[in-house]
């Protein structure tokens, strides 16, 4: 058990760090999925920095910024148990001394699709804060979870587009025993919603196991699983290319990703799985 050093200012953080660093940006409310990212970071560099910052720039006006779970004490305890040395917990004023911010990173066309269509400006907010955090921490490697597949795609693209000398490492989704992907938002679900939420991963599994029949049959297999659950309101279900993140055409063969987003009660959940299309 380590007691992580909590750094609240950029000056403190810069003074504390030396040598190779692996970085895990988070918004806190940490679960086992985050802790897998931390474990991976520890394999990549001797010093691990985790940031906890609920970034206002990536929330829309009617989203859950105010009610987003904040559990700093529990987070520090979990990070200490994983041996994390440094936790960067800036205030909004520290990260955004002049608000509203005038300069942003824009996420381009893919940033306006899927999550970005339902949450306008979300990915500009994500990329802007990630770019700022990468500039502040200056890590050798940064670790993200595959559950946010579109975020991973866009951050990887940003790192390439802006020539940031940072390795982007991606860790597989951690799931509950019934398949539900771990998410800080799962705690919003009541018992009925929690039971309903497992159809997201079941729908993905149905698509994956129909990959040998082609794109449309795979999507139809997922749809038929979703139809059995009244509490789920589907936002999108799509199969995208891992290289362009654009929807694949019927007839596409090769590796792809099935993406799903749905609202369960008032909670928006996302998930994805790799799929191999062979028909
Ligand atoms: O995935 C998240 O928790 C956030 O989008 C991130 C990367 C920490 C940026 O605020």
Image (spheres, rainbow, N blue to C red):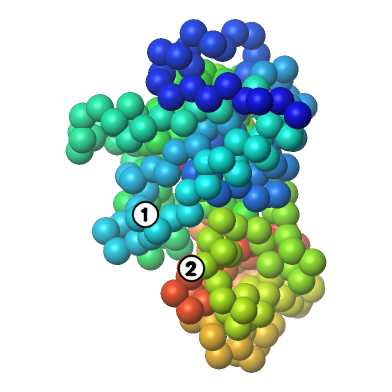
Instruction: Estimate how packed mark 1 is, as few (under 14), some (14 to 19) or many (20 or more) residues with alpha carbons within 10 Å.
Output: some
Quarter containing the N terminus: top right
Along the line of sight, the residue nearer the viewer: 226 or 88? 88
Identify the residue at image location x=54%, y=11%. Answer: 16
- The numbered mark at residue 203 is none
Q: Is residue 257 visible?
A: no
Q: Dot 2: within a 10 Å radius of its alpha carbon, few (fewer than 14), some, or many (20 or more) residues?
A: some
| Relative image position of residue 228 (x, y in whole percent) | 64, 91
Q: Earlier in the sequence, mark 2 or mark 1?
A: 1
Position in image of residue 77 (x %, y %): 65, 38
- Horizontal relation, residue 33 to residue 137: left or right: right
Total numbered circles: 2
Residue at (58% x, 21% y) in the render: 5
Q: Quadrant of residue 245?
A: bottom right
Q: Is residue 76 visible?
A: yes
* Residue at 49% over, 44% down: 27
210 versus 161 height, above or below? below
SS label for mark 1: loop
Quickly name the residue at label 1: 65
For mark 2, what is the residue?
Answer: 268
Question: Is residue 56 shown left or right of residue 224?
Answer: left
Whole-percent x, y for residue 253 in the image: 71, 63
**Secondary structure under the numbered disc 2 in the rendered image:** strand
Q: 42 or 158, which lies in front?
A: 42
Marks 2 and 1: which is nearer the front? 1
Q: Is residue 238 above or below residue 257?
A: below
Q: What is the quadrant of the C terminus in the image?
A: bottom right
Q: Quadrant of residue 98?
A: top left
């Amino acid at each position: 058990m380590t007691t992580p050093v909590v750094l609240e200012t950029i000056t403190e953080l810069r003074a504390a760090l030396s040598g190779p660093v692996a970085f895990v940006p988070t918004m806190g409310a940490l679960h086992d999925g985050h802790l897998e990212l931390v474990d991976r970071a520890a394999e990549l560099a001797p010093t691990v920095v985790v940031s906890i910052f609920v970034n206002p720039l990536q929330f829309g006006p009617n989203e859950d910024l105010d009610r987003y779970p904040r559990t700093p004490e529990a987070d520090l305890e979990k990070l200490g148990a994983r041996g994390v040395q440094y936790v960067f917990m800036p205030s909004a004023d520290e990260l955004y001394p002049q608000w509203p911010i005038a300069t942003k990173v824009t996420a381009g066309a893919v940033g306006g699709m899927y999550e970005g269509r339902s949450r306008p400006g979300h990915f500009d907010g994500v990329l802007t804060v990630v770019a700022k955090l990468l500039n502040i921490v200056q890590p050798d490697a940064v670790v993200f979870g595959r559950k946010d597949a579109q975020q991973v795609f866009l951050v990887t693209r940003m790192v390439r587009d802006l020539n940031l000398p940072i390795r982007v490492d991606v860790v597989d989704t951690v799931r509950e025993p019934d398949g539900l992907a771990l998410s800080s938002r799962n705690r919003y679900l009541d018992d009925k919603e929690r039971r309903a939420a497992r159809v997201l991963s079941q729908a993905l599994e149905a698509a994956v196991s129909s990959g040998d029949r082609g794109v449309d049959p795979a999507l139809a297999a997922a749809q038929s699983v979703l139809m059995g659950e009244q509490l789920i309101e589907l936002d999108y279900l799509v199969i995208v290319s891992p290289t362009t993140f654009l929807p694949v055409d019927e007839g596409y063969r090769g590796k792809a990703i099935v993406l799903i987003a749905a609202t369960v009660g008032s909670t928006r959940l996302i998930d994805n799985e790799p799929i191999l299309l062979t028909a």
